[in-house]
Amino acid sequence: MGGLLHLLVISFLLYFSRAEATSAVGVNYGQLGNNLPSLPDAVRLIKSRLSAGSVKLYDANPQILRALSNTGLEVCTMVPNELIANISADQALADRWVGSNIVPFYPVTRIRHLLVGNEILSDPNNRWFWLKLVSAMRRVQKALKKNQIRNVKVGTSMAIDTLELSSVYPPSNGSFRSDISGSVMKPMLQFLSETKSYLYFDPYPYFHWAKDPEKINLDYALLESKSIRYTDPGTGLVYTNLFDQMIDSMVFAMEKLGYPNIRILMAETGWPSSGDYDQIGANIYNAATYNRNLVKKLTARPPVGTPARPGQAMQGFIFALFNENQKPGPTTERHFGLLYPNGSRVYEIDLSGKAPSSGYELLPAPTNNKPYKGRIWCVVAPGSNNRTALEAALTHSCSQGNGTCEAIRPGKACHEPDSVLSHVSYAFSSYWAQFRKSGASCFFNGLATQTIKDPSHGSCKFPSVTL
């Protein structure tokens, strides 16, 4: 009997050891595309093509939650940003939301994380309900407890800009922004500590590197450096990659508020496989290198942790499952996927961490690891022939800025040819040239694309961005 009990204990421990290993790296499943696979196909691809152990959603889509039932995949679901304010003030609403979006699917769908909002502390337009966030988290936690659901962790996701100046040099200087430190973060960390939950962090070394590629070494950002070291002057800790610096900056920020032991779960990270001319380093080689190295780090046994937390295991989700063609913003936003919408791989990757690096096919050499130098225009994208959408975009562009469309008025230099396509291309270029520094992108709901071929003709000179 003792021998049988011993075997059962070993089997139990091995089961949970395997569960931890296979769920170390998950994938974010976004839905902003009009050409994505069916739910059954998507779930099959998550398991068989990527060998992921978990899935993170940006809502509580009942069809997706149902499709993920009995798959063994752990699931992270989300309360939409727009419900936070109401839930924070109404326990009955929190109860109804959990009753409709969690209870019907749990436990056959292995929901393990419930995020209340997505990066709301990054958006100054949401400032008015930042103070409502922790109250909403507490109400959701209470609703789970009422339904005897005790192993779903509640939190919210946050980006690097929750730190003062988004600074990671040095990590020991990490501190939360003054507008959220005492009012939002301290009570949030108290809640996370009480419930043994995680701080859900979205570190993106790509964006940090791309802002300053002259000072930050690319291999250091890709977790690929063999020789580069950064020593934190405040602690003496030695760093070998930018990812660890970002994680530890958050660790030190929490420590400054009196919470040194809250675990960090990486809710999002990734590297784009393509981008615009003005987006350095967005290519397949870098994306594959970063994500493969990250998987190797997160699935290492024993765990490697970070310099501030050596040996501590970390779970996480890579962004994203598919390239999503309806995501707004610059081209990189639509090229974070591990898979194309037809299900084929953008590059080989095994999220279980079991595939040896030597088994992967050679990657195409990167061509844009140095900043582009020259002029860029923004014009109507090939295939954009929806006249109604183009005319609406023309009206919008021309109503912004100072003299944005003056040159295409009758009798002006760019009026001819008098066609919608020609006028819209001019308007896109003119608008983008004026507002790029304020954050405008050459996208216009998918109607626009960048070009380095000058569309000017005759005396008509299209405005451009010069890098």
Image (cartoon, rainbow, N blue to C red):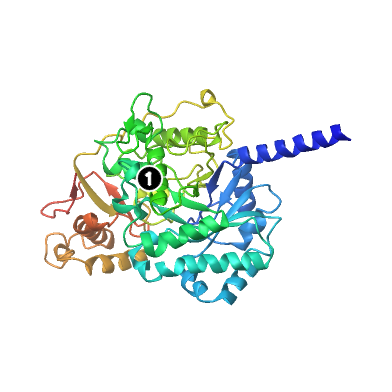
Q: Between 271 and 143, which is closer to the camera in this rendering?
A: 143
Residue located beneath label 1 in the image:
249
Q: Between 11 and 67, which is closer to the camera in this rendering?
A: 11
Looking at the image, can residue 114 be seen? no
The 10 Å Cα crowd at callout 1, few under 14, some 14 to 19, many 20 or more, is many
Q: Is residue 103 above or below residue 353?
A: below
SS under mark 1: helix
Q: Please give left or right for residue 94 compared with residue 379 in the image.
A: right
Give the percent coordinates (x, y) of residue 411: 11, 66
Q: Please give left or right for residue 314 compared with residue 216 in the image.
A: right
Give the percent coordinates (x, y) of residue 115: 52, 59
Q: Is residue 322 above or below residue 432?
A: above
Q: Amino acid at mark 1?
A: Ser
Q: Between 406 and 371, which is closer to the camera in this rendering?
A: 371
Q: Quadrant of the C terminus?
A: top left
Q: Is residue 66 above or below residue 336?
A: below
Q: Quadrant of the N terminus?
A: top right
Residue at point 30%, 34% (across, down) = 369
Give the percent coordinates (x, y) of residue 282: 36, 40
Residue at point 51%, 60% (across, down) = 191
